[in-house]
Image: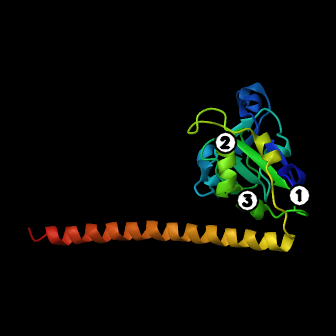
């Protein structure tokens, strides 16, 4: 089975076409726009980095993130991320493919796991246009990507393991950052007290 059999795949919005020239030119709608920096390795979606975006009219819902959408960067490193309820309602630009799965057939987190497999990334790199470092992939590439359909409950189990793994990695990253800050504070205090005796 192929991705096109279990999902709807499209490219994000070409934002320049819909961008309002300014409030003086009539009505406009305010949104928040995702950028490439909003998806961090290994696939964490940080909507806090989204930019303000004014559109000249209301955007179609297919260009706004919805819970359980999968976003894939169309340029290296082709990172993929899952949209949750907190990251819904953001404008997706044309730098991303939007994969909306049929949840009666596949689990979104299972599809995300497939996209992150080395075998999938290898296929992506084999189909880029341009150089390996700066090449891009067309969102239509994902239509013909094969997916092994296992029973839905088993897909959900794999998806849950993936989500738990991501949460663990995020917590470890936060812990490492906090530990580095603590160590710097300890060293600063040590220097302060030691330098008094000069």
Q: In this view, does 180 lie to the left or right of 83?
A: left
Mark 3: give few (<14), some (14-19) or many (20+) Cα within 10 Å: some
Q: Position of residue 176 (x, y in %)?
A: 45, 68
Q: Residue placed at 51% from the left, 67% from the top?
A: 174
Say which element carries label 3.
helix
Between the residue at mark 3 and the residue at mark 2, the CA separation in whole angstroms equals 17 Å
Between the residue at mark 1 and the residue at mark 3, the CA separation in whole angstroms equals 15 Å
Q: Which badge, 1 or 3, comes first in the chain's sequence?
A: 1
Mark 2: give few (<14), some (14-19) or many (20+) Cα within 10 Å: few
Tags 1 and 3 touching, CB below 8 Å: no
> Is residue 92 at all visible to an observer of this figure?
no
Q: Quadrant of residue 131?
A: top right
Q: Where is residue 76 in the image (x, y as percent from the top left)?
A: 60, 43
Mark 3 highlights which residue? 114
Image position of 115 with respect to 17: above or below: below
Q: Nearer the viewer, residue 152 or 13?
A: 152
Mark 1 highlights which residue? 102
Mark 2 highlights which residue? 126
Between the residue at mark 1 and the residue at mark 2, the CA separation in whole angstroms equals 27 Å
Q: Residue placed at 76% from the left, 29% from the top?
A: 17
Tags 3 and 2 touching, CB below 8 Å: no
Q: Nearer the viewer, mark 3 or mark 2?
A: 2
Tags 1 and 2 touching, CB below 8 Å: no
Q: Which of marks 1 and 3 is in front?
A: 3
Mark 1: give few (<14), some (14-19) or many (20+) Cα within 10 Å: few
Say which element carries label 1.
loop
């Amino acid at each position: 089975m192929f991705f096109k059999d279990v999902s709807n795949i499209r490219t994000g919005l070409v934002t320049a076409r819909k961008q309002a020239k300014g409030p003086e030119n009539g009505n406009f709608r305010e949104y928040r726009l995702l950028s490439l920096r909003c998806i961090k390795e290994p696939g964490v979606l940080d909507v806090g980095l989204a930019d303000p975006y004014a559109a000249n009219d209301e955007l179609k819902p297919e260009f706004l993130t919805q819970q359980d959408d999968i976003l894939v960067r169309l340029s290296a490193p082709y990172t993929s991320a899952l949209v949750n309820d907190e990251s819904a309602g953001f404008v997706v630009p044309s730098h991303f493919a939007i994969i909306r799965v049929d949840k009666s057939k596949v689990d979104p987190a299972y599809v995300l796991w497939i996209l992150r497999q080395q075998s999938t990334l290898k296929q992506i790199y084999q189909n880029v246009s341009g150089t390996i470092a700066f090449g891009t992939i067309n969102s239509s590439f994902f239509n013909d990507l094969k997916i092994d359909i296992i029973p839905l409950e088993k897909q959900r189990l794999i998806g849950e393991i993936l989500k738990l793994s991501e949460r663990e990695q995020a917590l470890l990253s936060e812990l490492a950052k906090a530990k580095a800050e603590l160590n710097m504070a300890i060293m600063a205090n040590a220097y302060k007290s030691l330098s008094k005796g000069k």
